[in-house]
Image (cartoon, grey):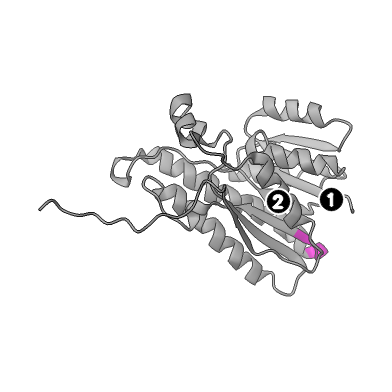
Amino acid sequence: MKVQTILITGASSGFGAACARIFAEEGNRLVLAARRIDPLLALQEELAGKAEIHIIPLDVRDREAVHGALGSLPAGFGEIDVLLNNAGLALGLEPAHQVNLDDWDTMVDTNIKGLMYCTRFVLPGMVARNRGHIVNIGSTAGAWPYPGGNVYGGTKAFVTQFSRNLRSDLLGTRVRVTCIQPGMAETEFSRVRFKGDEQLAARVYQGTEPLTAEDVAETVNWVVSRPAHVNINTLELMSIHQSWGPFAVYREDG
């Protein structure tokens, strides 16, 4: 298989780190970006000898930082073949009339604007080379609502529609676009959502067998490894312990 240069955002843990491991096993060149430098350094050390790795401490919400980092990649890493837009988060589970507006801002800035910035700075090179693949990590929350999902679900619905529109813009090129929509998965996701409350986070997965980061990484790898003429548009995956419920109906007393 051809060695590719793969840029992963949110690479310090969860889906991003699992994808880095699986891509490294195949000898790809990796650009790993995340806000936390220590986990990136640990991941770089873990994967040493398997792949060439360049790490970037980066907050994707910072437009100028994204531009600077992606515009100054070292020789051998500058031509990105695959961009995995993985950086994202959920904060809180309160109903919309009780949320902290700062949490909404953070989700929009990370899940939407950060994804936009990274895509915009990488895409021109892909179009010029007439090859490449944008893989966006969405969520089942972008298609299926749940109480407290409000803005998080809205940001992930954006990811799905943005992916579709990107593919429309790129018709006539050989640049592929995929949106992967995982359901419930046990990573740092719930710990972040509940701001470090381990008990609340554990309760989300109690009595279930959720998806793992490795499940999602294998899915990403499968999508990326399809023949160059095959574009997987959207792929939704859930644990067997998760499905859809009936319509909610509120009934007044009496």
Q: Do callouts 2 and 1 mark residues in contact (Cβ within 8 Å)?
A: no
Residue 56, horizontal then vertical, whole percent: 72, 36
The magenta stretch spans residue 131: yes
The residue shown at (66%, 60%) is 178
Q: Nearer the viewer, mark 2 or mark 1?
A: 2
5 lies above or below 33: below
Q: Which residue is mark 1?
A: 4
Q: Which residues are magenta?
A: 128-132
Q: Position of residue 153 (x, y in %)?
A: 45, 51
Place of residue 252 in the rendered image (x, y in percent of width and height, measured from the top left): 15, 53
Q: Amino acid at mark 2?
A: Val
Q: Secondary structure at mark 2?
A: helix
Question: Alpha-carbon distance for marks 2 and 1?
Answer: 14 Å
Is label 1 in a helix, a strand or a loop?
loop
Q: Residue flagged by tag 1: what amino acid is it? A: Gln
Given residues 199 and 91, the one toward you in this image is 199
Would you say 2 lies left or right of 34 here?
A: right
> In the displayed structure, would residue 252 be above or below residue 185?
below
* Residue at position x 84%, y 50% in the image: 4
Q: Residue at x 23, y 54 (%)?
A: 250
Q: Is residue 196 magenta?
A: no
Rate crowding at label 2 as few (under 14), some (14 to 19) or many (20 or more) other CA atoms within 10 Å: many
**Residue projecting furthest to the bottom:** 172
The answer to which of marks 2 and 1 sits earlier in the sequence is: 1
Q: Residues within 10 Å of mark 1 (few under 14, many from 20)?
A: some
Give x and y (percent) for residue 64: 62, 44
Instruction: Return the mark for residue 220.
Output: 2
Q: Is residue 246 left or right of residue 65?
A: left
Q: Residue at x 52, y 41 (%)?
A: 89
